[in-house]
Image: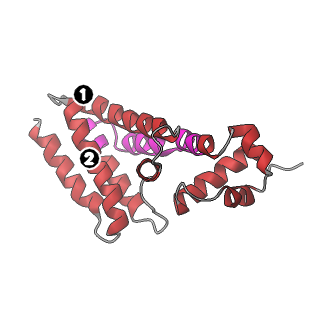
C-alpha cells in the first residue's frame, strides 16, 4: 500500500511548483512529466491547462500564510497588521522566492477570459477584506481606503523583492504601514 497522491493531486502539486518557478506559460509536457501522469488525466480532472492553473491559484495557501502571521501577531490589530510585513520579510528573503504567483499570473495571461483572472481577483479581494476587517478592529476612520494602501505596500514588497532581493523592502514597507496606522490615531 502506498501513500502516493492520486493523479489530480500530483497534477496540482506539479503545476503549483512549476508555474511558480517558471511561470504560467510552462509547458503541459513538463507538468505531466513532473506529475507522472498521462495527458488524459489533465483533461479528465481539469479540462485543460487553463483550468489547472486556475485551480492552482484557487487552492494555494497564501491567504492562510497572512492569517497565520496575524495570529502570531497576537490580539492587538496594529501588531497583527505589522506581523504581515514581518512575514513578508521572511518570505521575500527566502532564496526560492520568485514573487507573487497571483500578480505574475495576472500579468502573464493576456487573454481576459482566462479563468485564472477571476482567481487572482478573488485572492486580492480576500486579502483586502482581511486588512479592512483588521483596520476596522483597530478603529481606523476609513478602513477600506487604508486597506487599499496596505495592499499597495504588500504588492510593492513582493515586486521589489524580486528585482532587488537584498533591499529588504518588507522592512521599509513595515515603517510605512506604521505611519499609516499611527496617522489614524
Label 1: few (<14), some (14–19) or many (≥20) C-alpha neighbours in 10 Å? some
Label 2: few (<14), some (14–19) or many (≥20) C-alpha neighbours in 10 Å? few
Q: Residue at x 42, y 39 (%)?
A: 67
Q: Is residue 178 above or below residue 75?
A: below
Furthest residue in direction bottom, as rendered: 166
The count of marks equals 2
Q: Is residue 69 above or below residue 29?
A: above
Q: Residue at x 37, y 41 (%)?
A: 70
Front: mark 1 or 2:
2
Q: Nearer the viewer, residue 163 or 181?
A: 163
- In percent of width and height, residue 49 lies at 63, 46
- Of the numbered discs in the image, which one, if any, rests on residue 152? 2
In the rendered image, residue 47 lying in the magenta stretch gets the answer: no
Q: Is residue 58 above or below residue 84?
A: above
Q: Overall secondary structure of the magenta stretch?
A: helix
Of the 4 image quadrants, the one containing the C terminus is: top left
Residue under numbered circle 1: 136
Q: Residue at x 42, y 58 (%)?
A: 99
Q: Which residues are drawn in magenta?
A: 53-81
Disc 2 element: helix
**Residue 56 in sight from this viewpoint:** yes
Counting residues from the start of the chain, the first of labels 1 and 2 encountered is 1
- In percent of width and height, residue 69 lies at 40, 45
Amino acid at each position: 500500500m502506498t501513500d502516493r497522491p492520486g493523479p489530480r493531486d500530483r497534477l496540482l502539486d506539479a503545476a503549483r511548483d512549476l508555474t511558480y518557478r517558471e511561470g504560467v506559460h510552462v509547458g503541459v509536457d513538463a507538468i505531466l512529466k513532473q506529475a507522472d501522469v498521462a495527458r488524459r488525466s489533465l483533461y479528465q480532472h481539469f479540462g485543460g491547462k487553463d483550468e489547472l492553473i486556475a485551480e492552482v491559484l484557487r487552492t494555494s495557501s497564501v491567504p492562510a500564510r497572512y492569517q497565520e502571521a496575524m495570529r502570531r501577531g497576537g490580539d492587538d490589530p496594529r501588531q497583527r497588521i505589522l506581523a504581515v510585513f514581518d512575514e513578508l520579510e521572511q518570505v521575500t528573503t527566502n532564496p526560492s522566492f520568485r514573487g507573487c504567483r497571483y500578480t505574475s499570473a495576472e500579468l502573464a495571461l493576456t487573454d481576459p477570459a482566462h479563468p485564472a483572472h477571476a482567481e487572482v481577483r478573488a485572492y486580492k479581494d480576500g486579502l483586502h477584506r482581511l486588512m479592512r476587517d483588521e483596520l476596522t478592529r483597530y478603529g481606523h476612520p476609513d478602513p477600506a481606503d487604508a486597506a487599499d494602501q496596505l495592499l499597495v505596500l504588500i504588492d510593492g514588497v513582493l515586486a521589489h523583492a524580486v528585482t532587488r532581493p537584498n533591499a529588504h523592502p518588507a522592512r521599509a514597507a513595515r515603517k510605512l504601514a506604521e505611519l499609516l496606522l499611527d496617522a489614524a490615531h
